[in-house]
Amino acid sequence: MANQDVVLRPDMGGIASAAAMPGSSSRPIFACRGAASTSLRRRSGVDDDYGARSPCATSWVVQAMRASSPARSAAVDEYAAWTRKHPSALASFEQIAASAKGKQVVVFLDYDGTLSPIVADPDTAFITGEMREAVRGVAKHFPAAIVTGRCVEKVCSFVGLSELYYAGSHGMDIKGPGSNAEEVLLQPAREFLPVIAEVYEALVEKTKSTPGARVENNKFCLSVHFRCVDEKRWSPLAEQVKEVLRDYPDLRLNEGRKVLEIRPSIMWDKGKAVEFLLQSLGFDGRSDVLPLYLGDDRTDEDAFKMLRKRGHGLGILVSKCPRETDASYSLQDPTEVYIHTYIMMQIPA
C-alpha cells in the first residue's frame, strides 16, 4: 500500500476534510492519479494469488459456473462439520465481542447476497428498510464501508446512506461519505475505462442470442449474469465470453455466484481495497483495531484472506452451503446478517 500511486488532486476541493470516516482519526483519504501504475498491471492467462485465469480457456469457466450453482443442499452432518470450523457469528457473538474489547471496530460489508438477497434481476436487488436502519446504526458506532462488485453509483442508490464509504467495482472505485458523487477517492484502473466500455458493447451483442444472459456494466468491471440461463447453454455462453475476451489480454475473468466477472488485470481486489481504507484511516498495522468483513461471494475471499494474513480482523462468510473459505465465522443469509448487524451496536464504540 505504501507504494500505491496516490496523490492529492488540486481540484478535489474539500475532499481532505470530508474524507475521514465517522469515528475515525482526521487523517484523510487522497485522490488517485488517473492512470493506474504500470507496476500494478498484469497480463491475463496466468494463475496467481489474485485468481487470474485465461479468458480463452472455456473448460474452467464452465466448471466455475457449476461450482457457483450447487445442485443440492449439504447433508446435515456435512454442514455441522463445516460450522464447527466456521461457527455461527450469532452463536459466537460473545466471543466476537470479547475480541473487540478495547479495540476500534471497522465494519466492511458486501452488498449482493449479504445486505440484499440474490435475485434474478440484479436491478431489483433492493435493501430492506430494516436492513438500511441497521447499517445506519452501525455507521453511527463504527467506521463502515460497503465493498461490492457493483458500480458505486448503483450501490449508493440502493443503500441510500451518505455516511458510509463505498468501494465499487471490487474496490477499483472508492468514494467517501457525502452526497457529492464527483468526490472520487481512488480509481487504480481508470485507464481501463475505454476498454471496459468497448468490451461491454461487444458482450451485449455477442450474448444476445443466449436467452436469460445479461451483461451489467459496473464501470471498472463487467458482470455476465447467467442465473436465468438454462444450464445446457452455459458452455455456449462461456464460449461467447471467451471469443470477446480473446482480443483483450489486459482483462481477466473470474467467477462469482451465478456471474462471470471481467476485470482489469491489475493487482487489485476487495482485500486491497480494505487495506487501502485501513491505511488511509490511520489504522494500518495497529493492534488495537478489529476489522470485520461480511461477504458471501468468492470475490470476498480476497478480503478474508487479507485479514487472516494480517493476523487480526475477522471474516464472516454468508452462506448456507459449506465451502472452503478463509473466513472465521459464518451466517446463513441476509436475515442473519441483519440480526448480526443490529446486535453489533452492542459492542462499545
Image: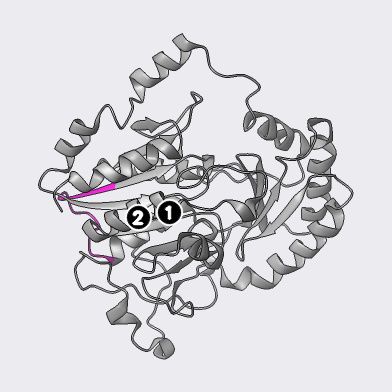
Q: For the residues labelled 2 and 1, say whether their Cβ atoms are less than 8 Å apart.
A: yes
Q: Does residue 296 appear to the left or right of 292 in the view shown?
A: right
Which residue is nearer to you in this view: 308 or 48? 308
Residue at mark 1: 129
Residue 341 location, x and y as percent? Answer: 32, 45
Which of the numbered marks, if any, corresponds to residue 133? 2
Magenta span: chief secondary structure? loop
In the image, is residue 288 part of the stretch drawn in magenta? yes
Alpha carbon separation for disc pair 2 and 1: 6 Å
Q: Which residues are magenta?
A: 281-291
Secondary structure state at the residue bearing disc 2: helix
Which is more toward the observer, 175 or 94? 94
Amino acid at pointer 2: Glu
* Residue 225 vertical placement versus 248 (above, below): above
What residue is shown at x 81% (from left), y 42% (from top)? 237
Question: Element under label 1?
Answer: helix
- Badge 1: how crowded within 10 Å, few (<14), some, or many (20+)? few
Query: Which residue is more in the foreground, 108 or 249?
Result: 108
Q: Against 105, is 298 above or below?
A: above
The percent position of residue 169, horizontal first and vertical second, equals 55, 59
Would residue 22 be counted in the magenta stretch? no
**At 79% across and 47% down in the image, what residue appears?**
242
Amino acid at dot 1: Gly
Image x and y of residue 251, in percent = 67, 57
